[in-house]
Image (spheres, helix red, strand yellow):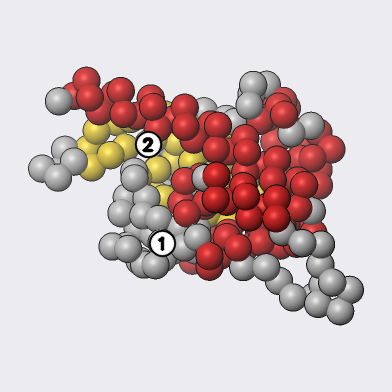
Amino acid sequence: MKGILGLLQQKPQPDPVEGHLDSKLFASTFMGGGESGMLVPWEARAVEVGAKRMNPDRGTRLLQPLWAKDKHMSRLDMDAVSRMEPFIDYASVAAGRDLIRQDEQGNFMVVLLTGSIAVDRVQPWGERMRLTEAVPGEMLGEMSLLDGGVRFSVCTTLTDCEIAVLSADAMDQMLSADPALTASLVTVLARKLSLRLRGVSARLSEKR
């Protein structure tokens, strides 16, 4: 994570002639090289689960108060969330759909805006263990967004849901357009991710 932040801080301002060239920091530099899973981008998953596009204005109005109540995400003010709007896909998804599947390679994260999502871990012996049930404001898949690695769990909509999706390609576009905003987002994601990993580790230890 320090490596990502370092590269963000060292990223030079785009040259007027070369400013049209897109950075591939998130989409390529930190991809996991395939590892053991197949890369499933949001565009493919959206078609598979029948996601329907939402009005971006509604999505932003839902996201702003949710992040304002989060002690970490609140570091991004309302103006920052508005500046992210062009880079976020907002969608509605019916109940019973797998937004993220365990062991596939991912490059996007999901923010739940309305509804509920089950987060399960399928054990080697086949048992499906419920890790948590995500509520509005929670993020899923942020680790794979940052490193392109395989998914740790399966995330299934329990109800009709509205979600915000941020992909690695969109992060690259944001980095080119607004490096300071991208650095702030990566910082708060890292903090939240650390807390989540500690919580998951504790729950798994209890099951042993």
**Residues at marks 2 and 1 touching, judged by CB atoms closer than 8 Å:** no
Residue 206 makes an appearance in the image: yes
Quarter that holds the C terminus: top left
Residue 30 in the image, given as x and y percentages of width and height: 50, 60
Mark 2 or mark 1: which is in front? 1
**Vertical side of 197 occupied by 182: above or below:** below
Identify whether 145 is placed above or below 69. Answer: below
Q: Is residue 143 above or below residue 139?
A: below
Taking depth in this image into account, of 22 and 8 the one nearest to the observer is 8
Query: Which type of secondary structure does the marked residue at label 1 adopt?
Result: loop
Residue 61: mark: none
Indicate left or right for 139 with 60 as reference.
left
* Residue at 40% across, 43% down: 155
Nearer to the camera, 142 or 179: 179
Residue 165: where, in percent of width, then height? 60, 50
Residue 46 is at least partly visible in this image:
no
How many discs mark residues in the rendered view? Answer: 2
Q: Amino acid at mark 1?
A: Gly
Whole-angstrom CA distance, mark 2 to mark 1, is 22 Å
User: In the image, 111: left or right of 21?
Assistant: left
- Place residue 19 in its image quadrant: bottom right
Task: Give the residue drawn at x 40%, y 32%.
Answer: 197
Q: Work out whether residue 154 or residue 199 is closer to the camera in this orientation and state it.
A: 199
Question: Please, what secondary structure does the residue beneath circle 2 have?
Answer: strand
The crowding category of the residue bearing disc 1, from other C-alpha atoms within 10 Å (few below 14, some 14 to 19, many at least 20), is some
Residue drawn 53% across and 31% down? 192
Q: Position of residue 37 (x, y in %)?
A: 32, 62
- Tag on residue 119? 2
Q: Position of residue 35 (x, y in %)?
A: 32, 63
Which residue in the protein does label 1 denote?
A: 32
Q: Give the class, few, some or many, for how many residues have Cα within 10 Å of label 2's Cα (few <14, many ≥20).
A: many
